[in-house]
Amino acid sequence: MKIKDFKVERWMDAYETKCEINVGESCVDSLRLDELLEICGHRNEFITHLMAMKLTYGAIEGSDYLKKGILRLYKDVSPSQITVTHGTIGANYLVLMSLIEPEDEVITILPTYQQHYSVPESIGAKVHKLYLDPQNGFLPDLKALRHLVNDKTKLISFANPNNPTGASMDEAMLKEIVEIASSVDAYVLSDEAYRGMNHEGERFTASIVDLYEKGISTSSMSKTFALAGLRTGWVCSTKQVIEAVNKMRDYNHISCPMIDDYIAALALENKDKIIDRSLDIIRTNLEVIETWLKENSGFSYFKPKSGPVIVLKYDLEMDSKTFCKKLLDEEQVLVVPGETLDIEGHFRVGIGNNTDNLKEALKRIGRFYRKLCS
Ligand SMILES: Cc1ncc(COP(=O)(O)O)c(C=O)c1O
């Protein structure tokens, strides 16, 4: 199987250990185990439980305790509608590999996580790319989507909330997408890795699984719950989709690590407190960004609705990879070039991490830009 380089992962792998300040990161400041236990309490029980844990393969599709925590993120699903995976990346991969065939067509809404189009392309499917328009608040043009679907459309896929723009589709818009998908009996894969971090109002955007019988939600502990190191994610969908995913999963997972399963379940039991922390960090950093934007001409941004990433547009005739590499070389600050995320002329900044680091990075980015313009 031939597959394109995963541009954003290549960029991060190449440079994330070669910078002084990394503000390209898309997670909320990852929790240390002792911080997590501070939030969750029951430290002694936790240690006793781990010490007594016999390290078998564990529950193959995820423990009942973990599934119970995942179920609380949706309205009306049963444990058989969930399977636990190696992050959202594992969840997306398994869904695409188990449902898509070479004769299928897939519609992917971009910018997004590259898996959503490169995996179906590698299978041989025809992929239609629908680009989000900044003039439309980075929301999809549903008329254009309607024109793209046909009898061969097997799947419509997107990330909601979106990485890297922080845009978020509300329930009404998702229902329109469902209506379009159901007109051709297509699945909808909604990558919900960033769900639960709406900056205003209800924290959780509607999930596709609660709106459509052929809806597939993928997500994980990485972003909203600041626990990327657990590498724990899941697929939530119909029993039939889960069966198809599990058939594929047998060939590359067997099961996910038992310790990670237990920690993820504990975290989900305390999800509201963890999300309080995530949103506190994001809101503080958003203010830092807005103050900086007022003091630094040459940059603009779309105010995100959700999640820990934003894209900044810079006012220069320079491709984003060159811009970001020069920034790294001259100021040792790592951001992510828009080119790697299919949004040229921009760069991505994570707003889920240490505020002092963000302030220092922004100071250096401003200095770098002024030098470029002089
Ligand atoms: C939209 C989206 N989906 C999936 C992933 C993979 O994340 P993980 O496997 O850690 O859940 C990422 C990571 O950046 C992402 O941005």
Image (cartoon, rainbow, N blue to C red):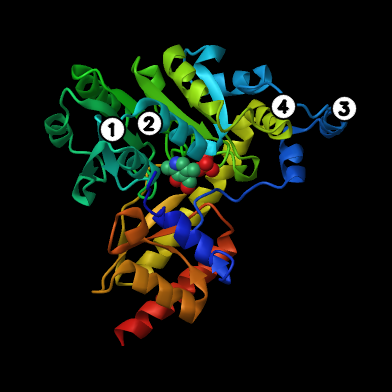
Gap in Å between the C-alphas at discs 2 and 3? 38 Å
Q: Residues within 10 Å of mark 3 (few under 14, many from 20)?
A: few
At 15% from the left and 26% from the top, the residue drawn is 150
Comparing labels 2 and 4, the label whose residue is closer to the camera: 4
Which residue is tagged 1? 102
> Is 105 placed above or below 288 here?
above
The amino acid beneath tag 3 is: Ala
Closer to the N terminus: mark 1 or mark 2?
1
Observer-side mark, 1 or 2, equals: 1
Which comes before the other along the chain, label 2 or label 3? Answer: 3
Q: In the rendered image, which quarter is residue 374 located in? A: bottom left
Point out the tag, 2 or 4, that comes first from the N-terminus: 4
Instruction: Find disc 2 in the rendering and name its residue.
Output: 190
Q: Is mark 1 within 8 Å of ligand 1?
A: no
Residue positioned 19% across, 20% down in the render: 184
Query: Can you identify the residue that label 3 sits on?
Result: 52
**Which residue, given by chain and number where applicable, does mark 4 sit on?**
57
Q: Assign a secondary structure to mark 2.
A: strand
Distance in Å between CA atoms under marks 1 and 3: 48 Å
* Residue 226 versus residue 368 in the image, above or below: above
Mark 3 or mark 4, which is nearer to you? 4
Residue 350 at x, y percent in the picture:
48, 56
Residue contact at pointers 1 and 3, CB within 8 angstroms: no
Residue 173 falls in image quadrant: top left
- Count of numbered circles in the view: 4
Q: Amino acid at mark 4?
A: Tyr
Tell me which amino acid carries mark 1. Answer: Pro
Nearest to the eye among marks 4 and 1: give it.
1
Select label 1 or label 3 by which is in front. Answer: 1
Query: Which residue is outermost to the bottom?
Result: 374
